[in-house]
Image (cartoon, rainbow, N blue to C red):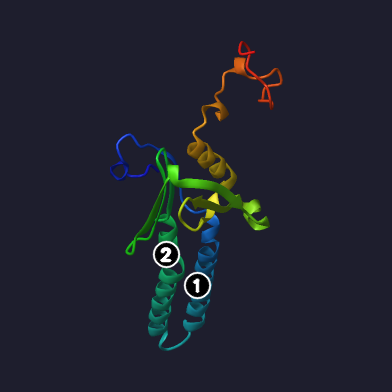
Amino acid sequence: MAYPDDLLSQGEQVVLHKHSHWKMLLLPYFCLVVVLGVGTWLAVLAQDLEWANIAWIVIAALAVVLIAWLFVAPFIRWRTTHFIITTDRVMARMGVVNRTGIDIPLSRISSVRFEHGLIDRVVGCGTLIIESSSQEPLEFYDIPSVEKVHTLLYREVNDNPHDDFARPAADLPPHGYPDQGYEPRGRR
């Protein structure tokens, strides 16, 4: 999904656009299954009552409210949370009604690091921590493939053409990857 082009400055391109990791939806999906299961069980119990129609309406209304609160709202929150890296900045946007966002120019980023515990490593996500020159570190939680995002952001911040993957084979040592102290052919 591309980020809206009208929010980008002239010449700016989206390098990466991600939502939070799907693990944020595990609890809402669990709540959905529990609410549907309990609602069905209560509806079956209420079928033999003489006021069964009223009980079914109450059960359905309560189920709709719980599903909206415990599943739909977190799903919409997840879907409207964006983490974007462009050629000029890092952007984070969240919310539907109350929208919040932050932009960090790449030139102001002083360091980038990531953290992920055992569960994060199993599901493939983590926390990206960005330190800018004048602010407290900003933590972005549940970023999918956080190590790859970290490397990509580091490359964008440093913009070093010598660390790109598309380096010509003539500039590589015989074993295929850069050495410390290695000079490309023809520069000795």
Q: Position of residue 87 (x, y in %)?
A: 41, 37
- In front of the other: 57 or 114: 114
Task: Note whether 116 is above or below 28 in the view shown.
Answer: above
- In front of the other: 89 or 135: 135
Q: Which mark is residue 124?
A: none
Going by the picture, which residue comes out furthest to the top? 186
Residue highlighted by disc 1: 35
**Marks 1 & 2, CB-CB < 8 Å contact:** no
Q: Position of residue 182 (x, y in %)?
A: 67, 21
Q: Which mark is residue 72?
A: 2
| Quadrant showing the C terminus | top right
Q: Nearer the viewer, mark 1 or mark 2?
A: 2
Query: Dot 2, crowdedness within 10 Å: few (<14), some or many (≥20)?
Result: some
Q: Secondary structure at mark 1?
A: helix
Query: What residue is shown at x 35% (from left), y 37% (from top)?
Result: 12
Task: Note whether 157 is above or below 45 in the view shown.
Answer: above
